[in-house]
Each structure stands twice: as C-alpha cells, then as structure tokens.
Image: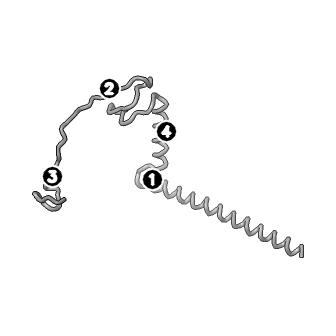
Amino acid sequence: MNLVSAILRTALKLVLIAAAAVFALSLIFVGLVSLVWVLLKALLTGRKPAFVTTFQRFNQARQQFKHGGFRAGPSAAGGFSGGFGPRGNEAEVVDVVDVQAHEVRSDQALPYGPKTDRH
C-alpha cells in the first residue's frame, strides 16, 4: 500500500509541476506577444507606446521638481507658470485681466434653426 501511495504522490507532484510550468510559459508567451504587438503598432503608426510616454512625463515632472519646484502650465514656452520661483520663496507676478462676460451664440450652428428657444 505504501508503494502505491508513494507512486501516486510522485505522479501528482509531477502533474502539478508540469501544470505550473505550462501556466508560467503561457504567461511569458502572452507577455512577449503583447510586447511585439505594441512595438509593431508603434512602428506602423509612428506614435510612441503609452507606457513610454507615461514614463517620459514622469521623468520630466521629476526633473522639473528637482530643479526648482513644480510649475503649472507651459513655463518652458514662456507661458503661464504658477507656483514659486527657482529659489522656492519668490512668488511670480501674474497679470490678471478682467473682462465682461457675455453669451456667445451662433444661430447657424443650432440644429433647430435661429430664433427658436428650446429649453
């Protein structure tokens, strides 16, 4: 009886090891096929994959924070830059322009025609 149970235990271990190996190899295969698909798509469309652009943005934000703090907006292009200056204690001066609010309406763009009020 001991010999039969030892053989069954060994066979069960071998089956489980084989199943785990097949599972691991299938995961690796799916990962490689997905990577090849993403790279081919990037080559054909000319656009960088999303994970590349995400890491590039993260590195840009990290470098920007390292060199003087976070700046909101396109500060490199000379546009709006909120937050603090390079030393971290000087507030930048921003010109604020106050305008009258008014409704912008284009009657030609309305699907139901001009002079019809649909609320």
Picture disc at residue 59: 4
Please tell me which residue lies in front, 37 or 85: 85
The secondary structure type at the circle numbered 3 is loop
Which of pointers 2 and 3 lies earlier in the amino acid sequence?
2
Please tell me which residue lies in front, 38 or 55: 55
Q: Are marks 3 and 4 in contact (CB under 8 Å)?
A: no
Q: Residues within 10 Å of mark 4 (few under 14, many from 20)?
A: few
Q: Residues within 10 Å of mark 2 (few under 14, many from 20)?
A: few
Q: Are marks 2 and 4 in contact (CB under 8 Å)?
A: no
92 up-or-down from 16: above or below: above
Nearest-to-viewer mark from 2 and 4? 2
Picture disc at residue 20: none
Look at label 1 and name its amino acid: Ala
Work out which residue is located at the far right of the displayed protein and give it.
Answer: 2
How many marks the image carries: the answer is: 4
Q: Which residue is mark 1?
A: 42
Q: Quadrant of the N terminus?
A: bottom right
